[in-house]
Amino acid sequence: MSRKMLKDSPNAALDKSLLNRYFDLPQPDNKFQAEYIWIDGTGEGLRSKTRTLNGIPNKPSDLPIWTYDGSSTYQAHGENSEIFLCPVAIYKDPFRRNNNILVLCETYNFDHTPTATNKRLACKDAMDSPAVKKEEPWFGIEQEYTFLDIDGRPLGWPKNGFPGPQGPYYCGVGANRVIAREIVEAHYRACLYANVPICGTNAEVMPSQWEYQVGPSVGISAGDDLWISRFILHRIAEEYGVIVTLDPKPVEGNWNGAGAHTNFSTKAMRSDNGIIEIDRAIERLSKKHNKHIQAYDPREGKDNERRLTGKCETSSIHDFSSGVANRNASIRVPRSVAEEKKGYLEDRRPSSNCDPYSVTNALVRTCILNE
């Protein structure tokens, strides 16, 4: 990052080393900090705030329900503004460490109905059904994202032009091919510390674009794990004075967009001759294409319209397709799966800013419950 970028970014200009003298202060044994995290009214933005608690919780229900000002998060009006925060998942805090925790929460209105962006409740209802539990659905989500400078332009791109064409950047090495690897490495290690099942990362096709993979996660944990991994990514990039965007098409033209390709399998798919069940799932998905397109980005397909053009390694948003090793298809069956006749399928339609609860919910309802 150039000195000019550092000057323009107030966060990057701060001396982070000064914080260590305060983190070195002994923390009382009976006090810990819990960072409550939730999804705001946009369906893709994350918010958080901290409280001090006594004792270490064994499970989310041990934590108190809290509230926040929903009129400031696009979720309520000022005259009746409080939204309930209900803890649902706990992760280790890689920022404060010690016994401090990150707490993922569901959000509920004053009348205890779920907020419009609480997609977790419906997802959990599907995951808890006997038929779905029996199939032990596994998910691996490939989260693509793009780094932006403080001015909103892709990080490291020329201010009055464009980098060279795509080709050398994917999984690239070298200062002329890779941008902000430090943030990527920090995020990877922080996710491991937090017990997020991050399983890989790589530079993507467009310069300043990266991907990491989370999974395999079972059932509702897939959404929990991805949301927390996003929170950690935003927090780390914040310290560097860099913006992370999950925009599915951050740069118009012949530049790759960003998706959240979702790998999905059931116990039947993973068993011998599971290819039969994979083909059955693809057949069911082909009949519910529009339903899935609406579920796969926060604006019911409008964001994906810019990405799913049939170009730049995408399928057309209007047509369902599938194929072995085909990255221009809606559903890709990996070559190894076709050869071994068992495994999983990859749904390439979800946008990078999707709600993973909506994606995983749609997959199990279509492929397992046949709804």
Image (cartoon, rainbow, N blue to C red):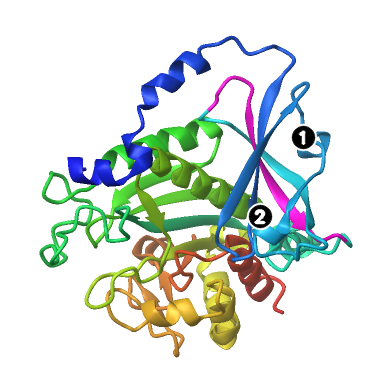
Label 1 vs label 2: CA separation?
18 Å
**What residue is shown at x 63% (from left), y 73% (from top)?**
367
Q: Which residues are magenta?
A: 96-110
- Residue at image coords 56%, 86%: 290
32 is higher (above) or lower (below) than 265: above
Mark 2 crowd level (few <14, some 14–19, many ≥20, 10 Å Cα): many
Asked whether, in this view, residue 313 is left or right of residue 138, the answer is left
Q: Are marks 1 and 2 in contact (CB under 8 Å)?
A: no
Left or right of 113 on screen, residue 338: left
* Amino acid type indicated by mark 1: Lys
Q: Which residue is mark 1?
A: 59
Q: Look at the picture and state if 318 lies above or below 315.
A: below
Question: Going from the N terminus, do you reach mark 1 or mark 2 first?
Answer: 1
Instruction: Residue at 38%, 35% (x, y): give it.
Output: 186
Residue 276, picture quadrant: bottom right
Q: Is residue 33 magenta?
A: no
The amino acid type found where label 2 is placed reads Gly
| Relative depth, front residue between 152 and 53 | 152
Asked if one can make out residue 2 in the rendered structure from this viewpoint, the answer is no
Q: Label 1 neighbourhood size at 10 Å, few (<14), some (14-19), many (20+)?
A: few
Q: Secondary structure at mark 2?
A: loop
Quarter of the image with the N terminus is: top left
* Magenta highlight on residue 107: yes
Kind of element beneath mark 1: loop
Residue 219 tag number: 2
Of the two numbered discs 1 and 2 in the rendering, the one whose residue sits closer to the viewer: 1
